[in-house]
Image (cartoon, grey):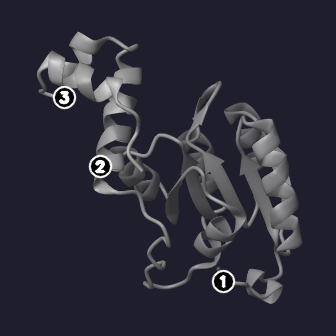
Amino acid sequence: MTDHDPTELGEDRTLLLVDDDEPFVKRLAKAMEKRGFLPETAESVAMGKAIAHARPPAYAVVDLRLEDGNGLDVVEALRERRPDCRIVVLTGYGAIATAVAAVKIGAIDYLSKPADANDITNALLLRGEALPPPPDNPMSADRVRWEHIQRIYELCDRNVSETARRLNMHRRTLQRILAKRSPK
């Protein structure tokens, strides 16, 4: 855990938080306020874009999947209005393709949920080419594999045959994996 001095934020401490999980965004807003930010929240792409156009913030944390669309649309709106905005994209559906897309359009970092206020603050304030420290408790390779299989299974509307085809895996093998508990 790295404690940041509020003076690191600079003159403009405005922060836009865009997430459709209302309890999460409220908790995060309180935590970020304690760290010296001046948070404003939005629960949709439309609200996020409206705030980006009316009052473009110095910092932003944007969820990738929102009920009314893709959070990358908010990132693009922020980049248009305020090119120096430091944006972190959050998602519960981590994938390399979306991480690359987020960074290409201007996000400075990409964090998988659950990310806490310290992780987010560290990502927002990280300067230069320094890499963030590795996580204290990373997922095991078995857990990463299991999460990937579960995500594809959900994207295929829980259709075992379609999931097995997309993963290039035998259907019975997939059924055995799905029947087991998640690895630690």
Where residue 139 sits: x, y (%)? 40, 57
Q: Quadrant of the N terminus?
A: bottom right
Q: Is residue 172 left or right of residue 41?
A: left
Whether residue 179 is visible: yes
Q: Secondary structure at mark 3?
A: loop
Q: 122 above or below 184?
A: below
Q: 11 above or below 110?
A: below
Mark 3 vs mark 2, CA separation in Å: 16 Å
The crowding category of the residue bearing disc 1, from other C-alpha atoms within 10 Å (few below 14, some 14 to 19, many at least 20), is few
Nearer the observer: mark 3 or 2; the answer is: 2
Name the kind of residue labelled 2 in the image. Answer: Asp
Residues under numbered marks 2 and 1 in contact, where contact means CB atoms less than 8 Å apart: no
**Mark 2 vs mark 1: which is more N-terminal?**
1
**Of the pair 127 and 79, the residue shown nearer to us:** 127
Mark 1 vs mark 3, CA separation in Å: 39 Å
Name the kind of residue labelled 1 in the image. Answer: Thr
**Mark 3 vs mark 2: which is more N-terminal?**
2
For residue 2, the mark is: 1
Q: Would you name the residue on which mark 2 appears?
A: 142
